[in-house]
Amino acid sequence: MLKESFPPVCGLSPKFLILGSLPGDKSLEQQQYYAHPQNRFWKLLFHLMEKKYESDYSKRIQLLEDHHIALWDTCASAIRPGSMDTAILSELPNDIISLLQHVTSIQHVIFNGNKAKQLYDRYHKRLSQISYHSLPSTSPANARFSFDKLVDSWSILKSV
C-alpha cells in the first residue's frame, strides 16, 4: 500500500509547474503520469495547446516541454489503498520548494485538484515570486466538471 511518486518532468525553462497529489495505481503500473485512460489530463493539455492528441508517452512529455510546463506531485510517498485522493495517509512531501528555488523560470504553480493544494499548503510556504492557481481535478472522480468546464478553468495555461 506504500506508493511513491515519480521524479519531476522538467524541461528547459518551464514557466508552469503542475502539481498532482500522488500517481494512481494505473500510472504506477505503467510508470507514466496520468496513465488512467479516463483521466482527462492529457486530452485537456493537447486540446488547450491545439495539438493532435497523442497516446505515446514520449510525445506527451514533449508537449509539456514544448509549452514550458513542468509536472510533479505533492507527495513523495504515501500509504493509499486504491487511487482515490481521499484515501491518502501518512504522506511524505516532495521537496517542491527546492525545485522552485533551483528552476527560477517557474512563475506559476498549478494545483490539479484540491488535494494537491491542501498537501502543498500543509508542508510548504507559498513563495511571493510565484503565482498559485487552484484548478479542478482532471480525475474521472471529478465528474461534476465537464470537459468544457475543465477547458475554461485550465485556459490559464494559454493566457499567461
Image (cartoon, rainbow, N blue to C red):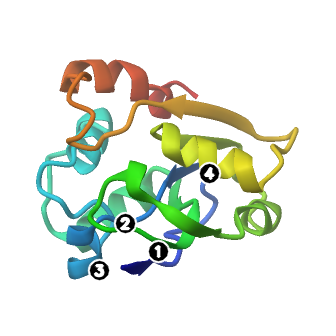
Instruction: Say which label, 4 or 1, has the lower sequence index.
Output: 1
* Secondary-structure class at tag 3: loop
Identity, as a three-letter code, of the amino acid under mark 2: Pro
Q: Which residue is mark 4?
A: 119
Q: Which residue is mark 1?
A: 5
Circle number at residue 92: none
Mark 3 to mark 1 CA distance (whole Å): 9 Å
Left or right of 121, for residue 22: left
* Marks 2,3: beta carbons within 8 A: no
* Marks 3,1: beta carbons within 8 A: no
Q: Which residue is mark 3?
A: 31
Q: Which residue is mark 2?
A: 23
Instruction: Say which label, 4 or 2, has the lower sequence index.
Output: 2
Q: Quadrant of the N terminus?
A: bottom left
Instruction: Say which label, 1 or 2, has the lower sequence index.
Output: 1
* Marks 1,2: beta carbons within 8 A: yes
Looking at the rendered image, the disc whose residue lies closer to the viewer, 4 or 2, is 4
Q: Nearer the viewer, residue 55 or 140?
A: 140
* Secondary-structure class at tag 1: loop
Left or right of 116, for residue 144: left
Q: Quadrant of the C terminus?
A: top right
